[in-house]
Amino acid sequence: MATLAAVLATTHHPFYLKATTAPEAEQIPQAAEWKRKVLAYRETLTRAKPDILVMIGADHFHQFFLDNYPTFLIGKAPRYDATFYNEEREFGLPKYVLEGHEDLSRFMHQGLLDRGFDFSFSHELKIDHSIICPIITTRPEADLPVVPIYTNIFAPPLPSPKRFWDLGRAIREVIDAYPSDQRIAAVGSGHLSLELGGPRQFGEHGPDPEFDRQAIEWLSTGNIEAILENVTHESMSKAGNATHGFMDLILMMGIAGGGTAAYVDSLDLYHTREAYLTWYPEGGHA
């Protein structure tokens, strides 16, 4: 059976690359620290020696809109074009072509259907910065095949936090059952408190520092009971109008199975807090 080598839960700030590669005189004050933290976090994936990446993210209304926004979707293509024009223009993100892993995508799709998750699928999926930013920060070589999974964190009605946890547990079951000797890492990105286009977007820190503090504590200690007791659609909206991306971090904790994270770090930027967490499931750490 396959080995789940590592589970990474992170944020996906689209300005990271631009902020840390601009001429030094033009960089934000946090750029050097940001780069140091990302390089340290990258090592948590490198040391796991993965062969395949299962990538969890969300489409930012690039390929899907209100006329057709799937709740959960898996890519089943042999390769994936990445980066949309506005991401090149605004964030300086390069174009990518990522290789797919059709066999694991097929196995994952069927396994999730068997576990009660009626996934949409796409053989023509183009992926955006929710997956490309974690590639840039954790695997910039972009040399491993990927299985992309998209969740709906933007277009109400949204699944519940419990549904995201349950999906993470189901993904873990499917990975554990995959008949292969390959090492699989799951890398997913979401948000802590976040405001997009609202009055709290450009503060000195994220819109709700207390939510951020609690969220990192809950994730890092595997405290799913506290998350499900305290995190609702309403509480996430109060923390910031785009905070629902936190549910993708819950999903990642579900894949890990809860428990204490082996690596925890964060960085307070001028309008958001970045988070970096890694779990090594038993037998997965090389």
Image: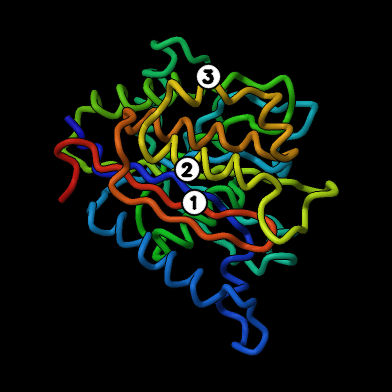
- Mark toward the start of the polypeptide (1 vs 3): 3
Kind of residue at badge 2: Ile
Q: Position of residue 25 (x, y in %)?
A: 65, 89
Quadrant housing residue 158: top right
The reply to whether the C-beta atoms of the residues labelled 1 and 3 are less than 8 Å apart is: no
In the image as oriented, which residue stretches furthest toward the right?
199
**Residue 275: mark:** 1
Q: Residue at x 59, y 63 (%)?
A: 95
The reply to whether the C-beta atoms of the residues labelled 2 and 1 are less than 8 Å apart is: yes
Distance (Cα) linking label 1 and label 3: 22 Å
Q: How is the model colour-coded? A: rainbow
Kind of residue at badge 1: Ala
Which residue is labeled 2 in the image? 216
Crowd band around label 3 with a 10 angstrom C-alpha radius: few (<14), some (14–19), many (20+): few
Local secondary structure at mark 3:
helix
Name the foreground residue: 205 vs 34: 205
- Mark toward the start of the polypeptide (2 vs 3): 2
Name the foreground residue: 190 vs 4: 190
